[in-house]
Image (spheres, rainbow, N blue to C red):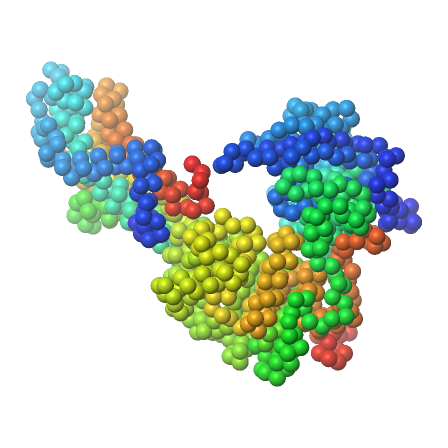
């Protein structure tokens, strides 16, 4: 969400944000990783060498152990002889939905609640923040299990459950910053001009929170992807055999010493995606912050 | 220990340049400091040389960016690294070059040979340690005293800096003390090791005038008692005149002029020094006139003011804030910020509210715009604003606008200047498209900026330009009253004069009224038609500028006027105040009933309030 707001603001003011983003090597690298992941998820059926659900006979050794990466199975095979590369490419679909959509919704909810409570004070503040504290104190996993048990498990339900659980930290952080921003003179000046609350909140306070929100949003990607895996592991997430990066790690973690590629490769994929979003987010923050210009 | 000072030897001892006999304690030669900027390295101190004679005071004066603070930090090897570094020169103290000493030796110099005082006493004290702990830390830092002896020395130091009830202070924390008391503690810490040199970087800038006068007198007394050489950095020529034996004027990192205090003030050789001195508002320079300094047709404005209904009418304005505490967040005590004040501001008139920090002057300004809750009655342009919500207040805000103290803080750093100035017009839906652009361009030109700068951001402007942007923004709704809250306090004197002139020109042109809130008596004297002196949330005296400055009646008004440092080194230096005085606290228990006051009318709208009984 932070990005869309940022982009509309910036495109109104300066058309070359994308161009400036592309000029930064790190941001460009991040952008490439994100594009590759998205394309892989969208075109998965045409990209994969094997069916991700098929258990190959030649995918296991004679002793029944999974195969390490080789010429036939590029990333090796898993415990039942399925091609890891194909599963990873399909898993990108799930993980993107969780990491971007679910996490994005969590960021939006958290930011809205935090900013509103931070600016308005009084009853609004008390009610919203006590509710946030309550959610924070409540074990997130338990809540997710309850929610997931009520609804029939599906990818979108899992995404919703994760969004419901993950907005709390962001709300807390945004609240603290919004609170100190509302005390600043420029907000006082806006009020003195007769600006309404909506204008102050979204045109003046929110842009100052962008950098915080971007950092939390990128951190959230890895957390939510793994939370989805936990839920899958408990049988209430994405149902097997549907692959996701998280549940590939979970299925195979007990064999980490004998088959490290089964954990390492999907782990690297999560890391790369989170890092890519982080790089792009950082660059976007610098580009959109006029006081940072000229520094790199 | 005070008996020995009956003769007050510190009061007047400037013989300026005749310092040839005094030995030099610190000799600085060709000091250069380099700072890394995005455009490559830049010299911020350029081959600066001076001597600091023993037991004398050298004032380094200059405007912001002149490199005066960098000089002090370089001498202490406290430059912010790696951004800034010493690029050359030497500073000899007791046969050692301070600029090349290794860190371990430098630590011995800091505190033991040179003590330093910074501008903001709250930030130079650690908020989580008690005064006693911090003071003893400074005393024992070099391992000479310990335990009981350190405690005794701490008490002795607090006594030297004239802090009342020293024993109790040792137990207190910095936030429990006032700004003046904190600065005394910082001075005590700087002197803890009997250092012979004191570097003071704007030591009184953050303090109120009456407190400033006390601290300056204290530094002078300590200097005489202990034979300390003081290097004082300040932007305030009044402070220079009060303190200096020698003056060094700096600009852009270079020495402009260096000489005895009398020489520099009486016969400045350089244009820049002359300009700097001319820009200093001098208290009393307006004696014998009624209108503000640059006002044209002032009589007409006054006559008009008398005929028409006043622009703003305030009756019994009271602002109190609850301080909440405990588990249930119930009110436990109350800040009596403003306590039943009444005044009017006529059309085309400037009323100044003057007083020290915490007296309620800013709160009064904010109440006029309904930015805080208040009681009483306020009428703006005949319309009562009592209990109006944000929406209902909007039409009123077209008549009243506000300019804040810190221009950078009051501008949204992420908006372009053009958008900032357009903001009020957009909010009130008064203009859009090309009409809006033209209006913004006109406003920027009106305040002396170029319309080409519309697409730039606030951080690309200097302090004075930023304040002009704020003024343009406030003017965009064509208000009839502007509340200017300490609007020139953060600016250099020369810029200050320009901004004040601009405000005055706008008034002459549009007949706008100002409620000018300031702590600076000299500025108030220049700009006001009428003045109200505030103390502890109340008015103590209100009248025309002439009444207040030429015939002050209330003892507090007199004290405020006397405390202002005057840029004249020949004026007798003020008496040392043996006991530190402080403003009382405006925080009272919930059941507190403020004392009744009685107003005395001296005629001609000159009013004096006195507490009854």
Q: Residue B526: where, in percent of width, then height?
A: 68, 64
Residue B352 can be seen in this image: yes
The residue positioned farthest toward the top in the image shown:
A62
Q: Residue B271: where, in percent of width, then height?
A: 70, 48
Q: Quadrant of residue B363?
A: bottom right
Residue B259 drawn above or below residue B543: above
Q: Tell me the residue at 65%/47% (across/down).
A: B63
Relative to A136, is B339 on the left or the right?
A: right
Q: Tell me the residue at 63%/41% (across/down).
A: B252
Q: Residue B476: where, in percent of width, then height?
A: 47, 66
Relative to A288, is A50 on the left or the right?
A: left
Residue A289 drawn above or below residue B557: above
| Count of numbered circles on the image | 0
Residue A236 can be seen in this image: no
Residue B96 drawn above or below residue A104: above
Q: Residue A104: where, in percent of width, then height?
A: 29, 47
Q: Tell me the residue at 62%/29% (across/down).
A: B87
Q: Quadrant of the N terminus of chain B?
A: top right
Q: In front here: B104 or B443?
A: B443
Q: Quadrant of the C terminus of chain B?
A: bottom right
The residue positioned farthest toward the bottom in the image shown:
B307
Q: Tell me the residue at 31%/38% (across/down).
A: A22
């Amino acid at each position: 969400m932070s990005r869309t707001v940022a982009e509309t603001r910036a495109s109104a003011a300066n058309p070359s944000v994308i161009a400036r983003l592309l000029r930064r090597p790190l941001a460009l690298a991040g952008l490439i990783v994100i594009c590759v992941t998205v394309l892989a998820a969208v075109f998965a059926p045409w990209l994969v060498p094997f069916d991700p659900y098929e258990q190959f006979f030649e995918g296991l050794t004679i002793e029944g152990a999974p195969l390490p990466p080789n010429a036939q199975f590029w990333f090796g095979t898993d415990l039942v002889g399925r091609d890891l590369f194909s599963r990873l490419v399909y898993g990108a679909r799930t993980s993107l939905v969780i990491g971007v959509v679910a996490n994005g919704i969590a960021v939006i909810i958290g930011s809205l609640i935090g900013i509103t409570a931070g600016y308005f004070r009084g009853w609004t503040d008390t009610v919203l923040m006590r509710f946030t504290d309550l959610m924070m104190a409540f074990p997130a996993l338990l809540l997710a299990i309850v929610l997931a048990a009520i609804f029939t498990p599906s990818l979108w339900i899992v995404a919703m459950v994760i969004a419901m659980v993950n907005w709390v930290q962001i709300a807390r952080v945004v609240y603290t910053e919004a609170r100190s921003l509302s005390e600043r003179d420029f907000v006082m000046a806006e009020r003195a001009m007769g600006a309404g609350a909506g204008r102050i909140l979204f045109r003046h306070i929110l842009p100052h929170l962008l950098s915080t929100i971007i950092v939390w949003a990128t951190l959230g990607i890895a957390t939510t992807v793994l939370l989805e895996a936990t839920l899958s592991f408990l049988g209430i997430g994405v149902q097997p055999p549907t692959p996701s990066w998280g549940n590939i790690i979970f299925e195979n973690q007990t064999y980490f010493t004998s088959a490290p590629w089964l954990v390492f490769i999907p782990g690297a994929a999560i890391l790369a995606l989170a890092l890519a979003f982080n790089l792009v987010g950082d660059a976007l923050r610098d580009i959109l912050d006029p006081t940072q210009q000229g520094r790199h | 220990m005070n008996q020995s000072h009956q003769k007050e030897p510190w009061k007047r001892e400037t013989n300026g340049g005749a310092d040839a006999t005094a030995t030099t304690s610190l000799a600085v030669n060709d000091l250069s400091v380099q700072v890394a900027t995005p455009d490559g390295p830049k010299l911020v101190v350029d081959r600066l040389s001076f001597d600091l004679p023993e037991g004398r005071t050298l004032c380094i004066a200059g405007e912001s960016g002149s490199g005066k603070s960098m000089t002090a930090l370089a001498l202490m090897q406290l430059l912010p690294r790696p951004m800034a570094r010493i690029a050359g020169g030497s500073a000899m103290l007791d046969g050692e070059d301070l600029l090349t000493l290794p860190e371990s030796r430098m630590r011995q110099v800091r505190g033991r040979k040179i003590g330093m005082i910074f501008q903001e006493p709250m930030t130079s004290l650690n908020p989580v340690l008690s005064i006693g702990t911090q003071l003893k830390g400074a005393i024992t830092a070099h391992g000479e005293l310990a335990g009981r002896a350190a405690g005794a020395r701490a008490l002795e130091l607090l006594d030297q800096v004239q802090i009342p009830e020293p024993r109790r202070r040792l137990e207190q924390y910095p936030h429990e003390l006032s700004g003046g008391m904190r600065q005394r503690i910082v001075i005590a810490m700087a002197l803890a090791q009997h250092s012979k040199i004191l570097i003071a970087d704007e030591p009184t800038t953050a303090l109120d005038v009456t407190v400033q006068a006390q601290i300056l007198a204290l530094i002078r007394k300590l200097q005489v008692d202990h034979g300390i050489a003081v290097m004082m950095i300040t932007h305030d020529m009044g402070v220079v005149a009060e303190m200096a034996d020698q003056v060094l004027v700096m600009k852009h990192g270079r020495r402009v002029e260096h000489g005895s205090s009398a020489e520099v003030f009486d016969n400045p050789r350089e244009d820049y020094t002359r300009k700097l001195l001319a820009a200093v508002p001098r208290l009393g320079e307006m004696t014998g006139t009624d209108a503000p300094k640059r006002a044209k047709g002032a009589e007409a404005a006054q006559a008009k003011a008398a005929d028409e209904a006043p622009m703003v009418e305030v009756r019994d304005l009271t602002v109190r804030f609850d301080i909440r505490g405990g588990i249930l967040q119930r009110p436990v005590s109350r800040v009596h910020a403003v306590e039943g004040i009444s005044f009017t501001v006529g059309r085309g008139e400037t009323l100044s509210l003057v007083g020290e920090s915490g007296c309620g002057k800013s709160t009064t300004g904010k109440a006029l715009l309904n930015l805080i809750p208040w009681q009483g009655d306020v009428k703006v342009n005949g319309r009562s604003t009592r209990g109006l919500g944000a929406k209902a207040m909007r039409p009123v805000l077209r008549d009243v606008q506000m300019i804040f103290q810190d221009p950078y803080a009051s501008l949204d750093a992420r908006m372009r200047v053009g958008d900032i100035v357009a903001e009020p017009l957009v909010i009130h839906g008064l203009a859009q498209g090309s009409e809006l652009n033209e209006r913004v361009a006109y406003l920027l030109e009106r305040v002396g900026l170029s319309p080409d700068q519309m697409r730039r951001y606030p951080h690309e402007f200097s302090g004075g330009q930023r304040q002009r942007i704020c003024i343009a923004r406030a003017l965009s709704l064509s208000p009839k009253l502007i509340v200017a809250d300490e609007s020139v306090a953060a600016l250099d004197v020369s810029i200050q004069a320009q901004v004040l002139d601009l405000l005055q020109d706008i008034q002459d042109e549009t007949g706008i009224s100002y409620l000018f809130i300031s702590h600076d008596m000299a500025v108030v004297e220049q700009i006001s038609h009428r003045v109200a002196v505030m103390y502890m949330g109340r008015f103590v005296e209100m009248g025309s500028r002439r009444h207040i400055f030429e015939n002050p009646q209330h003892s507090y008004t007199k004290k405020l006027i006397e405390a202002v440092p005057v840029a004249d080194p020949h004026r007798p230096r003020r008496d040392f105040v043996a006991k530190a005085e402080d403003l009382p606290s405006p925080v009272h228990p919930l059941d507190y009933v403020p004392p009744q006051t009685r107003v005395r009318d001296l005629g001609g709208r000159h009013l004096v309030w006195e507490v009854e009984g």
